[in-house]
C-alpha cells in the first residue's frame, strides 16, 4: 500500500485527478450549478467515501469520475489521460477497461443470466468467447455465486443481485471500482456482505470510490470527502 | 462484439415481447406475401390471355367491313355499303400470289344461327359458320374426331357439318358418337363429318358451341347470297403479318375503288396487335397490383419502425447500462439494427411461404403464375425494410448519452 502523496505536483501514481471542475445544467436564470469548482485527486489503492446529502452534487461528481458525463469546465485526467480529448467511443473504451460500476439499483440486464451479465463488459472488450466464460465464472466465484450462474436477475435476492453486479464490475479487472449508493436498496445483512467485499477488494489493492449518504458505509472507507452545494467541504483521512 | 453475440442479444430482445414481435412480423409478412401473390395474379392473368390468343393463331388477320366508309359517307350509306361489301371474289383475289404474295391462306366466312336437332334432342347453335377448308388451319381449329370437309364438298355444296364439342355433346351425349350421324339444321339434313377439338374461349362466345359447314351450303340453305361477314386471312409467316395486312388493305381498296381521301371501310384485326394490346393491359394491371402490394410492404416497414421505437424507449436504461459497461456506438447500433432486420426477414420468410401456398389456388378466376424475381425482390426488400426502417430507432438508441440513458425510469 502506497501512501498518499499530496501536493501541487502530479505524482506518477495519481489515478484520478480533477481540477476546478464545474457542471452546470441549463442556462440563464434557470441554470443549476451542480458542481461549483471541485478539485480532487485519488491515488491508486485508496478507499474513498464521498458523502453528501441529496442534491449536494455527489452523484454528478460520480458521473463525471465514471466518464458517464462530461464537466462543463475544468480538467479531468484519468490514469494520466485527458478525458475531455477522448471521442465518445474512446470514452466507452475507458469505461469498459478502467472503471467498474456498481449502482444502487444493481442495473443488471433483465431476462439475462447472471453469467451472461458478468460476461457483458468482457464482450464489449472483444475477448474471446472461451476467455470470457472463464473470467466471468471466476468473478462469480469471487462473490460466492458460482452456483447461481444460470439464474436470471428476477430469480435472485437483492443482495445476490448486487453481488452479481460486483462480479460484473470486477470481471474486466478495472483500476477503479465506482459505487453509487451500493447498499441503498439492501437489508442490513446484505449491506454487511457487500461492504465486506469492498474491504477485501481494497485490501487486495483495488481502488474503491463509494458515493453514499450513510455514515455506516462511509466509516468503512479510509478517506472521507464531504460534498455540499457543489463544493468539497471536507477531506480527511479516517482509517 | 462478435456477430454471434449481437445475434444472441437481438434474439433475446425479440423474445422479451413475443406477441409484439409476432404482430410486427405479421405486418411485414402480409406486405411481402401481397407483393408476390399479386404480381403472380397479374402475371397469371396476362399469361391466360396470351395463351388464348395464341390458340387463335398469331399470324391471323380478320377482315370485316365497317358498314359504310368513314364519317361523312354515312349519309349515303345505301349505295356505298353495297359498294364496299366483301364478296367471294374478294376472297379468291386475295389468294392471288402476285397481288398478295404474303398471304398464305384465305377463308371467306359467313355466319348464321339456327337450331340443330337429332331426333327429339335440339340445341340452339349461336354461330353456324359457313367457310372453306382453309378456315380450320388458319384459325387454329383442329378436329377432334372424324374428318374435315374438302374443297370438293364446298364446290358441290355438300350438306355436311363439323360440330363443336359442346354442340356434339348436347346432341349426341358423347362427342365421338356424333360422327357419321345425321342432324337437322333448320329443315335440312346434314351429315356430321367430324367433331372439333375442345378450344378455350377467346372472348364472350363459346367456341365449342359452333357448327362449321361449307360456305356454299350455308348460302344455299340458310343465309342467302348476301355479303360475307368476314374474310379470314393467314399471313405466310408471323413476321409478315404487317406486310400481308398492307397488301390486303391495298387490294381491297383497289377492287372496291375506295377513294384515297377516305378512311378505309375495312377493319382488319391483326391477332398480333390484339396480343400486344392485351399484354400491355396485363402489364399495367400487374404494375397496379404491385403498387398496391408495395404500399402494404411499406406499411409493414413502418410497423417495424414503430415497434423498434417503443423497444428503444423501453430499454433506454438497458442501453445506458451497456454503455456504462463499455459498449461503443456501433455495438448498440448493431444490436438494434439486427433486431429490426431479424423482424423483417422473419416476416419476409413467412410472407414468401404464405405466398407459395396461396398462389397454388385460383384467385378471382386467375391461376397465379409466380415470378421468381418478385420473390427475390420482395425478400430482399424486406431485409432492406428492416435496415431502413430500423436505422432511425437504432441511431436514436446509439446516440443516447450514457448518463441520460441510465437516469431514464
Image: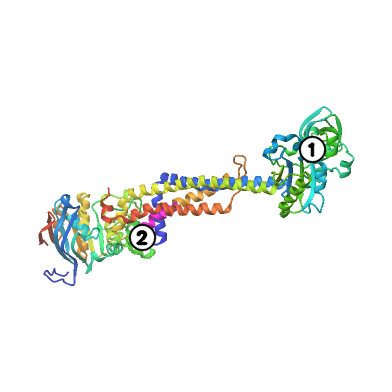
Range of magenta residues: B329-342
Disc 2 crowd rating (10 Å Cα; few below 14, some 14-19, many 20+) is some
Residue B323: image location, x then y, percent: 30, 58
* Left or right relative to B158: residue A226: left
* Left or right relative to B353: residue B316: left
- The quarter of the image holding the C terminus of chain A is bottom left
- Residue topped by disc 2: B330
- Residue topped by disc 1: B227
* Left or right relative to A215: residue B200: right
* Left or right relative to B8: residue A80: left
Quadrant in the rendering for residue A99: bottom left
Disc 1 crowd rating (10 Å Cα; few below 14, some 14-19, many 20+) is some
Against B238, residue B199 (above or below) is: above
Residue projecting furthest to the top: B120
Residue B278: image location, x then y, percent: 63, 46
Q: Is residue B362 visible?
A: yes
Against B230, residue B328 (above or below) is: below
Against A195, residue B277 (above or below) is: above
Q: Main secondary structure of the magenta part?
A: helix
Amino acid at each position: 500500500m502506497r501512501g498518499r502523496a499530496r501536493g501541487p505536483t502530479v505524482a506518477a501514481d495519481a489515478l484520478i485527478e480533477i481540477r476546478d471542475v464545474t457542471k452546470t445544467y441549463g442556462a440563464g436564470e434557470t441554470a443549476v450549478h451542480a458542481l461549483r469548482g471541485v478539485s480532487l485527486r485519488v491515488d491508486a489503492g485508496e478507499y474513498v467515501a464521498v458523502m453528501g446529502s441529496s442534491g449536494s452534487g455527489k452523484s454528478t461528481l460520480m458521473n463525471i469520475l465514471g466518464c458517464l458525463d462530461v464537466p462543463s469546465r475544468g480538467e479531468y485526467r484519468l490514469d494520466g489521460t485527458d478525458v475531455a480529448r477522448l471521442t465518445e467511443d474512446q470514452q466507452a473504451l475507458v469505461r469498459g477497461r478502467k472503471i467498474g460500476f456498481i449502482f444502487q439499483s444493481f442495473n443488471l440486464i433483465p431476462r439475462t443470466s447472471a453469467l451472461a451479465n458478468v460476461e457483458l463488459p468482457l464482450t464489449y472488450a472483444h475477448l474471446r468467447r472461451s476467455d470470457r466464460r472463464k473470467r466471468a465464472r471466476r468473478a462469480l466465484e469471487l462473490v460466492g455465486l458460482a452456483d447461481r450462474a444460470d439464474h436470471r436477475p428476477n430469480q435472485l435476492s437483492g443482495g445476490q443481485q448486487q453481488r452479481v453486479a460486483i462480479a460484473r464490475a470486477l470481471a474486466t479487472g478495472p483500476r477503479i471500482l465506482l459505487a453509487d449508493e451500493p447498499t441503498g436498496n439492501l437489508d442490513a445483512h446484505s449491506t454487511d456482505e457487500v461492504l465486506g467485499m469492498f474491504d477485501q477488494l481494497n485490501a487486495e489493492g483495488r481502488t474503491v470510490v463509494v458515493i453514499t449518504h450513510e455514515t455506516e458505509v462511509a466509516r468503512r472507507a479510509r478517506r472521507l470527502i464531504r460534498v455540499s452545494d457543489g463544493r468539497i467541504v471536507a477531506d480527511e483521512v479516517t482509517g | 462484439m462478435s456477430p454471434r453475440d449481437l445475434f444472441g442479444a437481438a434474439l433475446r430482445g425479440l423474445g422479451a415481447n413475443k406477441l409484439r414481435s409476432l404482430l410486427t412480423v405479421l405486418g411485414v409478412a402480409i406486405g411481402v406475401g401481397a407483393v408476390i401473390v399479386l404480381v403472380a395474379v397479374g402475371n397469371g392473368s396476362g399469361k391466360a390471355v396470351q395463351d388464348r390468343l395464341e390458340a387463335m393463331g398469331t399470324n391471323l388477320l380478320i377482315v370485316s367491313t365497317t358498314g359504310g366508309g368513314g364519317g361523312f359517307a354515312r349519309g349515303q350509306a345505301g349505295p356505298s355499303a353495297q359498294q364496299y361489301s366483301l364478296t367471294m371474289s374478294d376472297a379468291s383475289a386475295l389468294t392471288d400470289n402476285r397481288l398478295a404474295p404474303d398471304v398464305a391462306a384465305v377463308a371467306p366466312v359467313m355466319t348464321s344461327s339456327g337450331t340443330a336437332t337429332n331426333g327429339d334432342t335440339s340445341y340452339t347453335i349461336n354461330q353456324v359458320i359457313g367457310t372453306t377448308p382453309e378456315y380450320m388451319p388458319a384459325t387454329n381449329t383442329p378436329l377432334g374426331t372424324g374428318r374435315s370437309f374438302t374443297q370438293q364438298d364446298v364446290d358441290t355444296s355438300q350438306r355436311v357439318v363439323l360440330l363443336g364439342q359442346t354442340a356434339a355433346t348436347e346432341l349426341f351425349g358423347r362427342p365421338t358418337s356424333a360422327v357419321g350421324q345425321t342432324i337437322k339444321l333448320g329443315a335440312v339434313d346434314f351429315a356430321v363429318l367430324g367433331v372439333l377439338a375442345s378450344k378455350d374461349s377467346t372472348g364472350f362466345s363459346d367456341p365449342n358451341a359452333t357448327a362449321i359447314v361449307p360456305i356454299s351450303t350455308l348460302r344455299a340453305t340458310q343465309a342467302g347470297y348476301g355479303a360475307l361477314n368476314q374474310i379470314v386471312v393467314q399471313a405466310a409467316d408471323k413476321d409478315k403479318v404487317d406486310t400481308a395486312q398492307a397488301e390486303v388493305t391495298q387490294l381491297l381498296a383497289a377492287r372496291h375503288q375506295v377513294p384515297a381521301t377516305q378512311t378505309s371501310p375495312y377493319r382488319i384485326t391483326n391477332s398480333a396487335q390484339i396480343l400486344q394490346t392485351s399484354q400491355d393491359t396485363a402489364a399495367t394491371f400487374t404494375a397496379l397490383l404491385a403498387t398496391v402490394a408495395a404500399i402494404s410492404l411499406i406499411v409493414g416497414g413502418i410497423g417495424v419502425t414503430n415497434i423498434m421505437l417503443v423497444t428503444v424507449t423501453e430499454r433506454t436504461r438497458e442501453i445506458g447500462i451497456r454503455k456504462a459497461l463499455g459498449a461503443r456506438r456501433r455495438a448498440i447500433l448493431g444490436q438494434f439494427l439486427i433486431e429490426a432486420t431479424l423482424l423483417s426477414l422473419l416476416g419476409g420468410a413467412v410472407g414468401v411461404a404464405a405466398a407459395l401456398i396461396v398462389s397454388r389456388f385460383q384467385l378471382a378466376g386467375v391461376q397465379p403464375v409466380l415470378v421468381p424475381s418478385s420473390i427475390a425482390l420482395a425478400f430482399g426488400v424486406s431485409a432492406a425494410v428492416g435496415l431502413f426502417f430500423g436505422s432511425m430507432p437504432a441511431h436514436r438508441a446509439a446516440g443516447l448519452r450514457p448518463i441520460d440513458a441510465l437516469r431514464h425510469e
